[in-house]
Amino acid sequence: MTQISSDRRLSHNSVLDLMEMSLREVNQLLHDTRDGDFLIRNPRGAHALACGLDGDLNVTIEGHVGYYCAGMNKQAHVKVVGNAGTGVAENMMSGVVHVTGDASQSAGATGCGGLLVIEGNASARCGIALRGLDIVVKGSVGHMSAFMAQAGRLVVLGEAGDGLGDSLYEAQLFVRGSVRSLGSDCAEKELRDEHRAALRTLLDAAGVGGIDVAEFRRYGSARKLYHFQVDNAGKY
Amino acid sequence: MCGIVGLFLKNEALQGDLGRLTGVMLRELCDRGPDSAGFAVYGDGCKGITKICVVNCDGSTDWSDVAKRLSAVIHAEVAVEEIDDHAILRTTGSGEVARKWLIDTVATAYVLSQGQEIEIFKGVGSPAAIIERLNLEMRTGTHSIGHTRMATESAVTITGSHPFSTGDDTCLVHNGSLSNHNRLREQLVRGGERFQTENDSEVAAAYLASRMRAGDTLQQALENGLKDLDGFYTFLVGTREGFAVIRDPIACKPAVIAETVDWVAMATEYRAIAPLPGVEHARIWEPAPATVYAWSHAA
């Protein structure tokens, strides 16, 4: 499993300063590079920063980023030391995206693989249409999180807002705090040993220690909504 | 789309920089609303004197002549300050009466605001050009609200630009669109509200102004709005003393708030807040859905 690398030594020999380079220059440089460590300074809320990376890159961004940061990420390890705007790590394929602050809505939307760690809170629609990405949120998530999530896992150490897992397919949801309400066709399920073990592995990968996995509750699809039922034909 | 900014100064020493900082914020959101822009600046008011902001919207207006005729109607002196195609009329007479008379009588003018502290300016075209033409950066005061518009519900005209103001010293900017504004406008017209446009956001402004005239606090008016306004919105509402932010319960439209010991800033995107002095020490958060956040100098 991909992990947050705490022991990986960052040389940061390449400092990219957005006060001196344009956003396009920074992104192009990252696209043209297959590996290496980069430190990006002065993001000042810029959109689409470090998007579409595909390589063994280690990118640390010092400051708050705008929309779609690290979207479509492959292999790279992107760390945002600050907050992230809408759609951080949207549609990521692999690698790790790590936000030390809060994330705005639609964090990890449609993500296919890899690991997204948010140390603060994520707002509405976290993990919407998830397709295989694992998301670990140390804080809470807003309303309609994991809406129509198909595969992957959303782990929330805090609380979840209204409509968690509405129209859920086969993604697995684990919430340690309270859930304000479950969405349509989302149901609580038994947390068995295999779930506890998998959760432990995932939390370790996310660098989250000192948590008793037995404190989580598991939610999944009740599987009543995603197949058409002829009995409901008259309702449309 | 559309971009919203607001800046509420807690530190009086920054009041001379209000316009400059508001300009810096608004410029960051030009591409969210490239078709028109406007801003409200609160400050430089004198007790007992009402400022009425007006703009040419059809041909040209002889503001001195308008002032003379208005003066006879409200039985008070009316002074004129012309700023490009705008004018600020100052009087000790009734702002409410003056606003109605101007709307009814002066077909070439559009009334932007009236109140002791509020001044509203707006225009069509590039927000950056509007900021320069109307000298936003030279303005001083206690708090400000700005908007860059990408029109969805009504035409790209100066009258469709935000902020909208129908009540004394209150105004509103809106990102989103309302779906029940036509019905609500009819009800408000029956209740005596005076509209100048077909715009949905003006209905929201009039709704809040009407609730507050009926005795609601700003907080209560916004909470009632959650029941009565159907659609999606992030609103920033200015009053004489401060401003308030609210997002609809689904919270489609983005918003971010930052607060330091010196100021509170609200914007559609963080990049509009990023250039503010001391932002590295700010507490930054996304306002929760259906929740009122308000700041006031009166408190």
Image: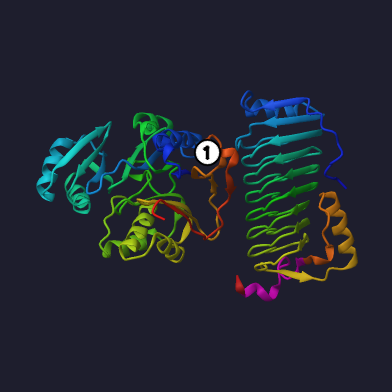
**Residue that protrudes farthest toward the top in the picture:** A20
Residue A221 counted in the magenta span: yes
Chain part drawn in magenta: A219-234
Q: What residue type is labelled 1?
A: Ala
Say whether residue A56 is left or right of residue B191. Answer: right
- The residue nearer to you, when weighing A7 against A173, is A7
Question: Residue A132: x, y in percent?
Answer: 79, 52
User: Residue at left 44%, top 47%?
Assistant: B152
Say whether residue B194 is left or right of residue B299. Answer: left
Question: Residue B236: x, y in percent?
Answer: 44, 50
**Residue that protrudes farthest toward the bottom in the picture:** A231
In the rendered image, which quarter contains the C terminus of chain A?
bottom right
The image quadrant of residue B64 is top left
The image quadrant of residue B44 is top left
Residue A79 counted in the magenta span: no
Question: Residue B97: x, y in percent?
Answer: 19, 53
Question: Residue A38: x, y in percent?
Answer: 76, 30
Instruction: Check the image and report above or below for B69 versus B290.
Output: above
Say whether residue B216 is left or right of residue A15. Answer: left
User: Residue at left 25%, top 62%?
Assistant: B192
- The residue nearer to you, when weighing A221 against A145, is A145
Please tell me whether mark 1 sits on a helix, a strand or a loop: helix
Q: What's the coloring here?
A: rainbow
Say whether residue A83 is left or right of residue B228. Answer: right
User: Residue at left 72%, top 58%?
Assistant: A149
Check disc 1 and report the residue beneath it.
B272
Q: Is residue A55 visible?
A: no
- The residue nearer to you, when weighing A164 against A227, is A164
- The residue nearer to you, when weighing B33 against B93, is B93
What is the crowding at mark 1: few (fewer than 14 residues within 10 Å), some, or many (at least 20)?
Answer: many
Instruction: Check the image and report above or below for B102 versus A60.
Output: below
